Amino acid sequence: MQVLVRDNNVEQALRVLKKKMQREGVFREMKRRRFYEKPSEKTTREKAEAVRRSRKLARKKAVRDGLVAAPRKRAAGLGKGGLPPRTRPPGRIMTQEMAP
């Protein structure tokens, strides 16, 4: 894997590298190899992944063919489920009477 650093911008190159590694599944593989996985667990996991992939492919094909409605796009700036991200409540406001 190769990433070019332009104008000594290392932060940008690191972001690009992380994105590439994420796409390739390097982080997932590292997490999976952290502990020993029994062969039976491995086959179970691989079968589940294959089922997930095939369902996703079938869903995409059904959307393409017009049999199923496409999932709604989320508006920008909204959190999970289309809700705005949580905001902290405002802190206590000191008035002149409260000030020491």
Image (tube, helix red, strand yellow):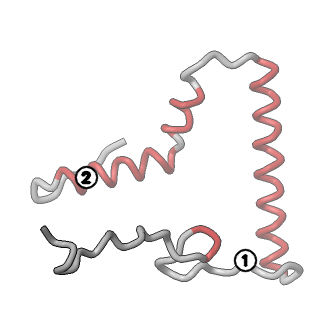
Along the line of sight, which residue is nearer the eye, 67 or 1? 67
Q: Which residue is mark 2?
A: 13
- Left or right for 71, reference 17: right
Q: Residues within 10 Å of mark 2 (few under 14, many from 20)?
A: some
Quarter of the picture holding the N terminus:
top left
Q: Position of residue 30 (x, y in %)?
A: 51, 30
Q: Position of residue 93 (x, y in %)?
A: 27, 75
- Alpha-carbon distance for marks 2 and 1? 33 Å
Nearer the observer, disc 2 or disc 1?
1
Q: Earlier in the sequence, mark 2 or mark 1?
A: 2
Query: Which quadrant is home to the C terminus?
Result: bottom left
Residue 9 image offset from top left, x and y in percent: 15, 56
Residue 64: x and y, percent? 78, 78
Instruction: Indicate left or right for 47 with 20 as reference.
Output: right
Amino acid bearing label 2: Ala
Residue 24's place in the image compared with 46, above or below, is: below
Write down the residue under mark 1.
71
